[in-house]
Image (tube, rainbow, N blue to C red):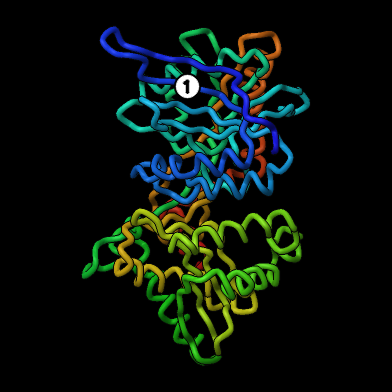
Amino acid sequence: MDTPVTSVGNCSISTPETQPEFEAHLLALSLEELQRVSPEWSTLSSLPRWREPFFQPEWFSAFALTFAKGLQLYLLSARWQGSLVAAAPLLRANTHFGRIPARTYRSLSGLHSCRYDLLHAPAYSTQVGHALWSTIQRDPWWEVIEALDVPEGGGFTTLLPHAQREGFLIGVWPTRKSPYLPIPAVGHDPFSYCPVGFRGWRSKLARKLQRLRHTGEISFDCSYSAQPGLDEFLALEAAGWKGQRGSAIVLDKTTTEFYTRIVDSFARRGALRFCSLRVDAKPIAMHLGLLMNGTYFVPKSAYDETFARFSPGHLLVHHVLHELPSMGARTYDFLGPAAQWKSMWTSHTRAHHNYYIFRPSVRGRLLHFAITQAAPRLRDLRYRVWGDPQAVPSTHDMRHAGAAKKT
């Protein structure tokens, strides 16, 4: 991470009547340089399309200091008359696709990133795509460029047509179908946009809440502070199945450090929300939530499994949706893949994809075949045997299953 800042490629675009307008660079980036460019990056990520936690410099810095520690960090960027108008943080590494090794520039992101994109000022999307592609293709080192979990129609796609025109190979791999729920304005039913079948589920939740009240004093709260919220959340998550299976945050030092940095950074921004459902002051369900640009994001949630019969996680969602309109929120973003429990709340999803650009060499063509032909066939076979993990039953299917169960 302390690689000196050096340029491995650059490009300028000019028009006949002006001096050079765009300058694009692919730079090896130190942590100090990442901090230096953060103010400009924050300006770019304040554009409505990218005003989400996952595109902020703090999020990428936390990832670089933890999961990417010791790896080679690069920044693909473009400037318009000296001002930053595009940025895509990348990792340069020797990776494997299956058993096939490849020299790869991949997104500075991973399992805990939720989503990734190339940020750019929309007014310059065509010029930016051309300038950035012209720059990165001049670096002969790489064989694959890989961007993980890019929202459909994201900024990274501006590179693809330029790559295709020059004979490079493109791969697209569908990943998450992240559910989200639009929220009406204050004064309207916050559940207006829930599925038609939600009415019955809402009645069940009311009965569950009533039964829960017999176990102790019920309270809901939402804290804006990093502590003690993070400690409570980590303890609650580790007490459940994630702790038993070894996937709880607190069981991994690097993951704990990542979320500690995220929580501290977004608490300073005023975006952090630790929302909790409590029984006798003890949390039985919690959100590690982030509120930005009118959207409530939930990167992590946890609940006490000894209260599972009361559906504490759903009760917390129900309460939070009541409160969000008064906080100025207009969307609840569940994040992560589609799941049946999320379908109880919404039928809206946001598609994400992994995007690949392969150099048209022998190895590049082999990798392209593996990603676009072999891997999808294996995935389809796995889905036929085990089922699609993101397949959510339709309302008709759920009603039919319920009727069959009664008979």
Residue 399 appears in the figure = no
Looking at the picture, how far across and down is residue 5, in whole percent?
A: 62, 29
Residue 229 pos. (x, y %) = 57, 72
Q: Quadrant of the N terminus?
A: top right
Which residue is pictured at 56% across the width and 14% down the height? 137
Q: Residue at x 74, y 40 (%)?
A: 70
Element on which disc 1 rests: strand
Q: Amino acid at mark 1?
A: Ala
Q: Nearer the viewer, residue 317 or 144?
A: 144
- Residue 332 x %, y %: 39, 58
Res 93 → quadrant? top right
Residue 45 lies, in percent from the top left, at 41, 43
- Kindly identify which residue carries mark 1: 24
Q: How many marks?
A: 1
Q: Is residue 388 above or below residue 316?
A: above
Q: Relative to 347, say whether 197 is above or below.
A: below
Residue at the farthest left position: 187
Which one is in front, 182 or 94?
Answer: 94
Residue drawn at x 72%, y 58% as measured from the top left: 247
Residue 13 appearing in the image: yes
In the image shown, does 384 or 123 lie closer to the viewer? 123
- Indicate left or right for 71 with 125 as reference: right
Image point (69%, 46%), residue name: 67
Binning the other alpha carbons within 10 Å of mark 1 as few (below 14), some (14 to 19) or many (20 upward) gives many
